[in-house]
Amino acid sequence: MMGVELSFVWAGIIAFAILAYVVLDGFDLGIGILYPALGSRADRELAMNTIAPVWDGNETWLVLGGGGLFAVFPLAYAILMPALYPLIIAMLLGLAFRGVAFEFVHRTRRLRPLWEAGFFAGSLVATLAQGIALGALVQGIAVEGRAYAGGNWDWATPFSALTAVALVVGYATLGAGWLILKTDGALRDRARRMARPLGAAFLASIGAVSLITPFLRPEYLDRWFGWPTGLFSVFVPALILLAAMLYIRGLNRGRDAWPFLTTLAIFGLSFAGLGISFYPYMVPMSVTIADAAAPDASLGFLLVGASVLVPLILAYTAYAYWVFRGKVHADEGYH
């Protein structure tokens, strides 16, 4: 019984790490996606300066989520990695190239256009890879016994392409909200203009994914329309609609924090919807959380380390955002 309890505690930690990565690294990936549309070079540089103090720290949560999955749920890791190898490699290469471009774009004049293109391309590739991997996970991973039993291209489907587009639009919406929050003047005005169509496209893509998902597997259909879990099919969309209304109101009334915060809320509610669909499976409808977990002794030992590490990460993340709070202006920079 203790092993089952620890496995669910760890599932919560991994889920939290993934959500933290999505909402934190999502907006700076969104800045990269929007980068070519941000106007003058001065405005593009200002946009990069808004994320300069925090972008690399945001990726800590990706390391915690991936490393935790390997250590705590080795069976799930062994199934998911062969299914998603090309996407994981593409994501890591995109993140690495984006990080190099972020540093080099301010160190050269002759090759600056190349590194600016690299910043955009790395952000886009990483986001597309994450979105396709999400779609592949939702539609199902073929499992036989305790191993991946699918083909090399099972992840390449119209549904995974749709989830990739939805994530690109979602990150771009987060990026626009971040720029509204952190800048003023021409860049903020440009971000506000972009935020309206981006927000509409984000909600439309969420709606399309949500309408298709219950019909991918009978278990999803039962979760979302059965009793009592069917109640969530009312509450979650209602809360998303409320967040969307506040998003629009924030744009109309010039409340600079509202678009960003409400987009974060929509991401959180969408993530909760995934949890409702998946629970209690680690590999949807194939391997449960308890079955995928490491031995009890390993779970307990690792939990001791996590009880120290996770609060430390939260503390230095909160401190970084507090120190660099407020608007960033054109005459300021962290490079």
Image (tube, rainbow, N blue to C red):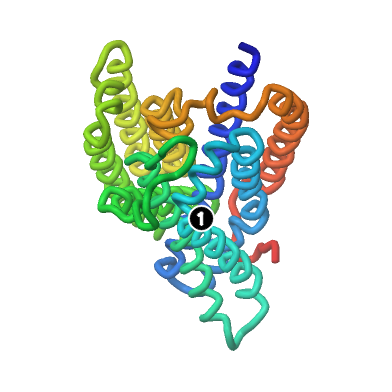
Compared across the picture, whether 182 is left or right of 280 comes to right
Q: Secondary structure at mark 1?
A: helix
Depicted 39 relative to depicted 33: above or below: below
Q: Amino acid at mark 1?
A: Ile
State the image coordinates of residue 261 (x, y, percent, origin top left): 47, 38
Q: Quadrant of residue 103?
A: bottom right
Q: Quadrant of residue 50?
A: bottom right
Task: Indicate the quadrant containing the C terminus: top left, top right, bottom left or bottom right.
Answer: bottom right
Q: Residue furthest front?
A: 145
State the image coordinates of residue 274 (x, y, percent, origin top left): 39, 32
State the image coordinates of residue 259 (x, y, percent, origin top left): 42, 42
- Mark 1 packing: few (<14 Cα in 10 Å), some, or many (20+)? some
> What residue appears at the point 47 percent right and 73 percent down from the top-left corner?
40
Q: Which residue is mark 1?
A: 88
> What residue appears at the point 56 percent right and 28 percent down from the top-left corner?
11
Nearest to the observer: residue 217 or residue 223: 217
> What residue appears at the point 42 percent right and 40 percent down from the top-left corner?
263
Residue 65 seen in the figure: yes
Q: Residue furthest bottom?
A: 110
